[in-house]
Image (tube, grey):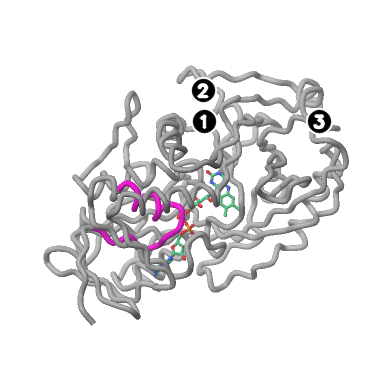
Amino acid sequence: MTTQSYDLIVVGGGAIGLSTAWAAGQLGWRTLVLEKFGVLNNLGSSAGASRQFRLQYAQRYMAELSLASVSFWARLQGHTQKTLIRQNGSLWFGDPAVDSQEGGISAAERVMDTLHIPYTPLDAAQIEAQFPFKNLPADYAGFFQGSGGIIDLKSTEEACLDAALDTGWVDVHEWEPVLTMEETGTGVRVVTAHGTYTAARMAICAGAYVNEALAPLGLSAGIDIWEMSSAYFALTQPAAHLPTWFVFQNPSDSALFYGFPEVDWAHPCYVRVATDFPDRIITDPSQRSGTPSPKSLALDAQWVRDHMVGLDPEPRFTATCLIALAQNSKRELLLDYTPAWGSPHSNIVTYTAGWAGKYIPILGDMIVRMLDVPQTELTYGDYTIPLKHFSIDWGRPE
Ligand SMILES: Cc1cc2nc3c(=O)[nH]c(=O)nc-3n(C[C@H](O)[C@H](O)[C@H](O)COP(=O)(O)OP(=O)(O)OC[C@H]3O[C@@H](n4cnc5c(N)ncnc54)[C@H](O)[C@@H]3O)c2cc1C
């Protein structure tokens, strides 16, 4: 077999890998994406049809990253006829004192005030009057932020793929897992069952599978993998104005829920409601069960029965998804140079963890800019994002 050479090899053709290929193709980098399964698969972190876009965050730099991502979404939108984000707004409500892994209401309001992001504060009675929720505790409060919305995830991945291929510089090989990688002195050599490839640079975008991908480098990343579930509930009356929403309640391991409006691309006449706590925490994707935990589904259904208007509380369709999250830290994303072969390598970047659906189009650009020139921060217009917030806790494979 001959060795083919590229400027960049992307390990993983999920949402972030495809976005990275798009960004690299725009620079004229000859790029190879190697995907273990088919693209647009439902076996990793991009399973399912919808994600929430929001500007509000408890950390200023995350809100700034959301603001910076808006122009990248607009650019990606230019590559498809489908609407990538439906701007129904974002409603956060619940107990203002709760601080979860999604942040908290008061902290997010403070950041929005600092960044002049408009929002409308609401008390429990106002939330019930304006949106289809009921029987909320009287001391619940929150806000509505109008720029939030629902991401059509599969169309977003498809648009990244099309945009990458349109550059004319990107090859995508499906069903071709990376088996080994090694240093060549001028870059990396990657071996699969179908070929050997060399490149000056590599982006490891393997999502929850990152530790399997990193093992040939003698590395592991400090992540937990949450297997999460969600369910679709039938509308029993014409849909009221339902934005994307998140409810903050204690305890955080059984009372955090979020949901979406009805959309035409996923089970029309149903809305999705999900638990924001893990069904189970695993260390390797091979340990996934692939079925929602009955306990999570029951809690989800109970929330719908008690607090949502116009829905049949019997879950009709269900789904599971794997998300890698930083272990032992509150880091929102994990994106870092990879210390392969004993020293930090500025030509290998790993992205693995976090709620990154909202950052799909900008993350590819971030990864490519890191690979182009060593960076400690990235500036987008008025916003400078320090990369130290996303550093990975590196270890050795078990
Ligand atoms: C239940 C759930 C809800 C979420 N909600 C939100 C939300 O509301 N808002 C938000 O912003 N984000 C949300 N997210 C997060 C968001 O979906 C993910 O951050 C995003 O989809 C991650 O994409 P990825 O490319 O990193 O991972 P993936 O899409 O999993 O891609 C990784 C790819 O790498 C491939 N791969 C792995 N190993 C190899 C190998 N050795 N060789 C070749 N290929 C390999 C895999 O097959 C896979 O296709 C949610 C995630 C989950 C699970």
Cα separation between marks 2 and 3: 25 Å
Q: Mark 1 Cα within 10 Å, few/some/many (few <14, many 20+)?
A: many
User: Which quadrant of the figure has residue 363?
Assistant: top left
**Nearer-N-terminus badge (2/3):** 2
* Image position of 173 with respect to 31: above or below: below
Magenta region: which residues?
8-23
Residue 360: image tag: none
Q: Mark 2 Cα within 10 Å, few/some/many (few <14, many 20+)?
A: many
Residue 267 horizontal/vertical position (percent): 72, 51
Residue 137: image tag: 3
* Quadrant of the image containing the N terminus: bottom left
Residue type for callout 2: Met
The nearer-to-camera label among 1 and 3 is 1
**Dots 2 and 1: beta carbons under 8 Å?**
yes
Q: Mark 3 Cα within 10 Å, few/some/many (few <14, many 20+)?
A: few
**Is residue 372 highlighted in magenta?**
no
Relative depth, front residue between 393 and 314: 314
Cα separation between marks 1 and 3: 26 Å
**Dots 2 and 3: beta carbons under 8 Å?**
no
Indicate left or right for 2 with 43 as reference: left
Residue 210 horizontal/vertical position (percent): 41, 63
- Residue where numbered disc 1 is placed: 55
The nearer-to-camera label among 2 and 3 is 2
Query: What SS does tag 3 mark?
Result: loop
Residue type for callout 1: Leu
Query: What SS does tag 2 mark?
Result: helix
- Residue where numbered disc 2 is placed: 112
